[in-house]
Image: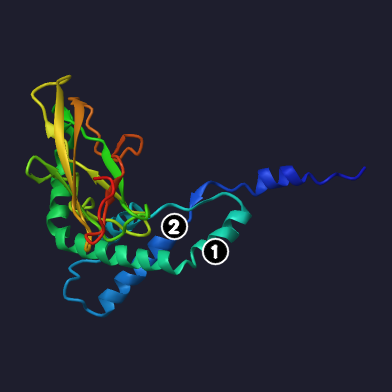
Amino acid sequence: MAVGYDRHKAATGFCMFNIHNIMEEQVESRVNQLYDHVKGQKASWLECDCENCRKDTICYVLNRIPPRYILSGRGVTHASTVLNDSQLLADIDRLAYEGMKMVNSLQRPYHKSATANSSGQESASNIPMFVFPTFIGNVYDGSSFEPLANASVILKEGKIPAEMMDASWPNPCSTYDATKGGYSFWVAPEVAEEVKVNKEFSFTLEVSAEGYVPVTYSFEVPLTSEVNNRNELNSTSSLKIKDLFLFRSDIKNELE
């Protein structure tokens, strides 16, 4: 008796695909290429191209471009079209260079602080703190409602820029075509007197772009102090800021 060929079993049992973000390989490959190129050019600003600096740069780029997930062979075929998008590739290069320069300008104190923090991590975990979610939002052109690239976004607590969790979260940050006008911040925790203390924090966003009227937006964040400090990013702990619209300086804002 002939043994039948179970195509479904073969597909699910032997050719199983996992959900995967194809931008990871694309960005990792391109960042490494650019590091090698800049190193070969002996650029004066390149202080270090170690594995940690390269990984910091890769994370910097991946946090600022939309993921592209695939599961099947058809997804791989579709991905090839996405990866040939000239605008996306240009945005990756621009973000990579920006990340490289940022990481290199801060890498020495950042590496030192990382070492110091790792040695004192256990004792610090017992300190009550106010732990902030990540702040995410988008900037749009007020007339076309299209995402606005090349905008500068500053997050202030009081009158000064808010301190970020680490060097990979710049403040101010910029918006790009690849992020569809998106921006994000992760504010460093603040020490509390004790646990379960309720406090409201006031923040202000200042958004500007060449040729546009600047916008300021204020918001409050209520928090309760805790000792279970989160030192790793939790994508489920985020606060979506309302969409912000900038109008060109030569166009009257009809909403006023």
Q: Quadrant of the C terminus?
A: top left
Residue 6 at x, y percent in the picture? 78, 44
Q: Read off the residue under disc 2.
A: 23
Q: Quadrant of the N terminus?
A: top right
**Drawn side of residue 129 relative to residue 72, left or right:** left
Residue 237 at x, y percent in the picture? 31, 34
With respect to residue 62, does 116 lie above or below? above
Pointer 1 or 2: first along the chain? 2
Outermost residue, right side: 1
With respect to residue 102, does 7 lie above or below? above
Outermost residue, bottom side: 41
Determine the image quadrant of residue 116: top left
Dot 1 falls on a residue whose secondary structure is: helix
Determine the image quadrant of residue 144: bottom left
Q: Nearer the viewer, residue 172 or 105?
A: 172
Labels 1 & 2 near each other (Cβ < 8 A)? no
With respect to residue 97, does 153 lie above or below? above
Q: Amino acid at mark 1?
A: Ser
Determine the image quadrant of residue 141: bottom left
Q: Residue at x 35, y 54 (%)?
A: 147
> Coloured how?
rainbow
Q: Residues within 10 Å of mark 2 (few under 14, many from 20)?
A: many
Q: Which mark is residue 202?
A: none
Q: Amino acid at mark 2?
A: Met
> What's the distance in space between the residues labelled 1 and 2, CA to CA?
11 Å
Q: Read off the residue under disc 1.
A: 80
Q: Residue at x 23, y 27 (%)?
A: 228
With respect to residue 139, does 38 lie above or below? below
Q: Residue at x 57, y 59 (%)?
A: 78
